[in-house]
Amino acid sequence: MFGALVKTYYAKHFNLNPENIVSVSIMPCTAKKFEANRPEMHDSGYRDVDYVLTTRELAIMIKQAGIDFLKLDDRSFDQIMGASTGAGVIFGATGGVMEAALRTAYELVTGREVPFENLNIMPVRGMEGVREASILIENPLPDWSFLEGIELKCAVAHGLVNAKSLMDSIVSGESQYHFIEIMACPGGCLGGGGQPIPTNPEIRRKRALAIYAEDQGMPLRKSHQNPEILKIYSEFLTEPLGEVSHHLLHTHYTPRERF
């Protein structure tokens, strides 16, 4: 999504020719290298992401260059599209996408923050293979009055074995969930194939704790509070799920052969 916006909104904002922009994505996931080459990833009219490096590859390059991070001055990211929220940070942990979405969805529907201490939706956190959470919707805003008394049922799975178990329950008609998050890698993206080696359950747990601590210390912790995202929608995308955002930010399922 960032790559598509760089070649469109960012280029237009700074009066740049998208042909002269090289987008490099740093990812914990080796699959992103393939994904960047998919035909759907050209919706900007150009290749949305030109190159992908894994975090492990970047770490090797940093060491080879002799860069000492402890001696570098802290600086903010360039604007535009440099602002982030705690909700974005926790995407890297299993359950993080679910938690970020619930923080926003519950508040938009009720006008109140999610009923969990400090916005921490603990039921979706952890390293269990499949986790469940439910939130009762009470006293929603008038536009959402039809959701009064609905219990929003959610499930989180990580690792392909656990994902299969959850998907099988859907196929069999046993699933009662409204919202499901699945991540292929154990622990989520923080346990991705492109991450530093070694990776084991304890390392993944510590990475998750670091992510949640970072979220806790951010001044903005909800996706819908990000001022730059709001600006992008007001100036360019116009509305969520609108024609422009659907074209640039969404893909469609494509069935593939197993081998």
Image (cartoon, rainbow, N blue to C red):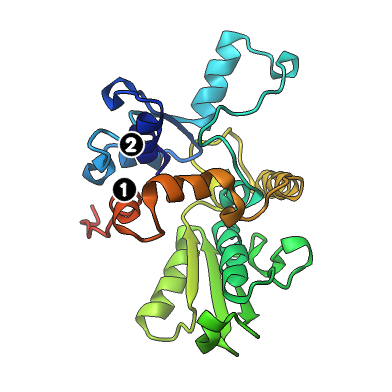
Q: Which residue is mark 1?
A: 248
Q: Nearer the N terminus, badge 2 or badge 1?
A: 2
Q: Count neighbours of disc 1 (C-alpha within 10 A) and say few if under 14, some if 14 to 19, many if 20 or more.
A: many
Identify which residue is drawn at 29% across, 57% down: 243
Q: Is residue 136 above or below residue 221?
A: below
Q: Nearer the viewer, mark 2 or mark 1?
A: 2
Residue 193 placement (x, y as % from top left): 48, 40
Query: In 3D space, how far apart are the residues under numbered discs 2 and 1 (Cα atoms)?
Result: 9 Å
Name the element at disc 1.
helix
Quadrant, the N terminus: top left
Q: Is residue 80 above or below residue 1?
A: above
Name the element at disc 2.
helix
Q: Which residue is mark 2?
A: 8
Identify which residue is drawn at 35% across, 53% down: 245
Q: Are marks 2 and 1 in contact (CB under 8 Å)?
A: yes
Q: Is residue 57 above or below residue 165?
A: above
> Total label count?
2
Identify which residue is drawn at 52% across, 24% down: 58
The amino acid at mark 1 is: Leu
Identify which residue is drawn at 21% across, 43% down: 39
Residue 140 placement (x, y as % from top left): 61, 82
Q: Count neighbours of disc 2 (C-alpha within 10 A) and say few if under 14, some if 14 to 19, many if 20 or more.
A: many
Left or right: residue 17 versus residue 147 is left
Q: Which mark is residue 129?
A: none
Left or right: residue 167 versus residue 95 is left
Residue 52 placement (x, y as % from top left): 40, 30
Nearest the viewer among 88 and 143 is 143
Residue 234 placement (x, y as % from top left): 45, 50
Identity of the residue furthest to the right in this view: 117
The amino acid at mark 2 is: Thr
